[in-house]
Amino acid sequence: RKEVEQDPGPFNVPEGATVAFNCTYSNSASQSFFWYRQDCRKEPKLLMSVYSSGNEDGRFTAQLNRASQYISLLIRDSKLSDSATYLCVVNAGGTYKYIFGTGTRLKVLA
Amino acid sequence: ETGVTQTPRHLVMGMTNKKSLKCEQHLGHNAMYWYKQSAKKPLELMFVYSLEERVENNSVPSRFSPECPNSSHLFLHLHTLQPEDSALYLCASSLRQGRDGELFFGEGSRLTVL
């Protein structure tokens, strides 16, 4: 079983739509969770950290479900500029070991 | 100027060549990382250095040899690579680890092994 699993997509959605991605992780000792964004032929960049209580940053909402070992990312009112690959990242126990999922590709269509 | 700089951006080498990838960070971070990104695969953590000491080594073949002379520089020495080693090699740095460890990536070095 992969340590971090994501649906690769692509998710094709119209502008203004709401879209949600899930990510599951296998290591129950994982303590820190993140969403990164990677544009085509660019490096990954941090989108947001995922806190136990859930957190929101503008149109983006991230949630953590420890019991089921998954995290989610919700994007509201999608923009063309949201088109990218969204990478789920998990870190176990305050280490330097950041494990990435394969990413979920999002295409927002005009 | 970007925070993490990688050179060269593109590299083509034969299987018998020896080459090196270089990474420099200008962010004052303590940790530096090498990741490998292949098509349709997740980023694979290769090596991590914290304060110039290797802290993670993920079963990487010995044909890849990292070097961290100081906290701002990281190298990946390449020797007798295989065609399946062709990939994007990403360097990253972070100030801390765990929950507070945001990774800042360079633009990557795209390697092609013939």
Image (spheres, helix red, strand yellow):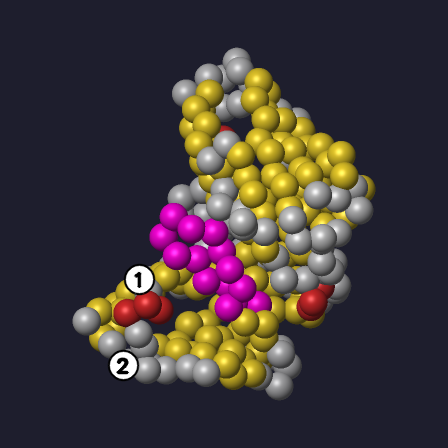
Q: Amino acid at mark 1?
A: Pro
Protein chain holding label 1: A
Q: Residue furthest top?
A: B16
Label 1: how many Cα within 10 Å (few below 14, some 14–19, many 20+): few
Which residues are the magenta region?
A: A34-47
A80 with respect to B52 (left or right): left
| Residue projecting furthest to the left | A110
Is residue A73 visible in this depiction of the protein?
yes
| B114 is higher (above) or lower (below) than B96 | above
- Which element type, helix, strand or loop, lies under badge 1? loop
Whether residue B36 can be seen here: no
Q: Earlier in the sequence, mark 1 or mark 2?
A: 1
Q: What residue is disc 2 on? A: A16
Q: Of all residues shown, which one is farthest toward the front? A: B1
Residue in the picture at 53% in, 15% down:
B17
Discs 1 and 2 carry the same chain letter: yes
Q: Judging from the image, what secondary structure is the residue with disc 2 in? A: loop
What residue is shown with label 1? A10
Could you say which quadrant of the image residue A25 lies in?
bottom right
Q: Is the residue marked by circle 2 packed among few (<14), some (14-19), or many (20+) residues within 10 Å?
A: some
In the rendering, which numbered label is found on residue B59?
A: none
Q: Nearer the viewer, residue B100 or A24?
A: B100
Residue A16 position, x and y percent, is 27, 81
Magenta region includes residue A35: yes
Whether B18 is drawn above or below B87: the answer is above
